[in-house]
Image (spheres, helix red, strand yellow):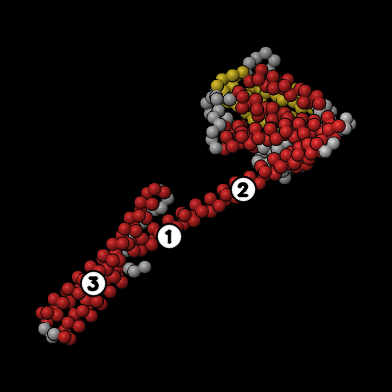
Amino acid sequence: MYSLRFQLLLSALIAAVGGATAFYFHPSFLLSLVILLGSVLLSYGILYFFVYRPLLRIQRVVDAQEDKLSVLRFIASSSDEFQRLSTSFNTMLESFRADIIRMKKLEGVRSEFLGNVSHELRTPLFSTQGLIETLLHGAVDDKKVNRDFLAKALNNIERLNSLLEELIDISRIESGEMKLRLRYFDIVPMLRAAVADMQTYAGQREIVLTFVGPADTPLEVFGDKERLRQVAVNLMENAIKYSEKGGTVVLSVSDAGDRAEIAVKDTGIGIAPQHLPRIFERFYRVDKDRSRDVGGSGLGLAIVKHIVEAHGSTISVKSTVGIGTTFAFTVSRTGVE
Ligand code: ADP
């Protein structure tokens, strides 16, 4: 980049060459002086119009960008405009580089997500396809297997359906489309009903599911009733899924002053400490095969975490392998954080 000093030096050089040439051809002092001054003006003009002015225009564009992004700093202290221009360019470049790194990272997350989704969809789809093909190739007339194959196909379709519902939920949450409908309501009957709805599933898996909460006193909270029900159901479903036959699951709610505390405690398989920090990530599963066998998608806890955090709370987990797991969170009773 040409500095101002260099620009002046160049003007002086052109002027001196002009003056010396004029003196050589016509040794008149006055005429040489006029030609010298003319050369100075001409060279300065050339530099101004063809170098300095275009650079100034670029500087203005950079400055406008600076305002728009509010990232670039205004470097006013430099006496050298070209120095300032180059510094602005460098700062802009740094900002663009940071943007590109961020976009590449997002691109990575997006393709990983798409990879996971297609993998999750493929398994039940291929399995259903195989079952239907076998039925068409004659198994439909075999009374020993036909109903069993159809039941398995139906099971796969139900799994696909719940996976799609969870995917829709997660995308609505992450795009900010899912708005909470916050209001005051008594959380006790809602949780009691959710436990009652889960009894059939618990019975099928031979798990004893109970509710513990205030008997007759209402416990009013400020939150989204439907979403909080979804959290409770999801945690109970996991507690049942990851327990052996004969285990127990307790959903409890208690008054903790200006908040209500909800916990789901099981006597299940537990989670090893190294997995605990990651279980709330999308598609993370401790034991993929076991999770798939019990119809898991790896999205449940990610949705739970989003909903609980949208209520201004955090979800905690305590677990010991072979002993059991407890998930807990609180909900505001006042609506004031
Ligand atoms: P999934 O659909 O696989 O159950 P989640 O997001 O609900 O996905 O849970 C993530 C993982 O956390 C599960 O795959 C399982 O390994 C583990 N997990 C969740 N809840 C429990 C629990 N109550 N007991 C033991 N492991 C659990």
On the image, the x and y values in percent for residue 67 come to 37, 49
Q: Is residue 48 above or below residue 292?
A: below
Q: Residue at x 14, y 78 (%)?
A: 33
Q: Mark 2 — residue?
A: 111
Q: Mark 3 — residue?
A: 43
Q: Residue at x 25, y 69 (%)?
A: 46
Of labels 1 and 3, earlier in sequence is 3
Residue furthest right as drawn:
144
On the image, the x and y values in percent for residue 200 come to 77, 23
- Whole-Å distance between the Cαs marked 1 and 3? 30 Å
Of labels 1 and 2, earlier in sequence is 1
On the image, the x and y values in percent for residue 71 come to 42, 50
Of labels 3 and 2, earlier in sequence is 3
Label 3, ligand 1: CB separation under 8 Å: no
Given the image, on which type of amino acid does mark 1 rest? Asn
Q: Residue at x 57, y 49 (%)?
A: 107
Report crowding for label 3: few under 14, some 14 to 19, many 20 or more residues within 10 A (C-alpha).
many
On the image, the x and y values in percent for residue 151 come to 80, 30
Q: Can you tell which of label 1 and label 2 is closer to the viewer?
A: 2
Q: Mark 1 — residue?
A: 90
Q: In screen coordinates, is 287 left or right of 15?
A: right
Report crowding for label 1: few under 14, some 14 to 19, many 20 or more residues within 10 A (C-alpha).
few
Q: Can you tell which of label 3 and label 2 is closer to the viewer?
A: 2
**Which image quadrant is residue 56 in?**
bottom left
Q: Residue at x 68, y 35 (%)?
A: 163
Label 2, ligand 1: CB separation under 8 Å: no
The foreground one among 112 and 40 is: 112
Disc 1 element: helix
Q: Can you tell which of label 1 and label 3 is closer to the viewer?
A: 3
The quarter of the rendered structure image containing the N terminus is bottom left
Asked if one can make out residue 57 in the rendered structure from this viewpoint, the answer is yes
The foreground one among 220 and 230 is: 230
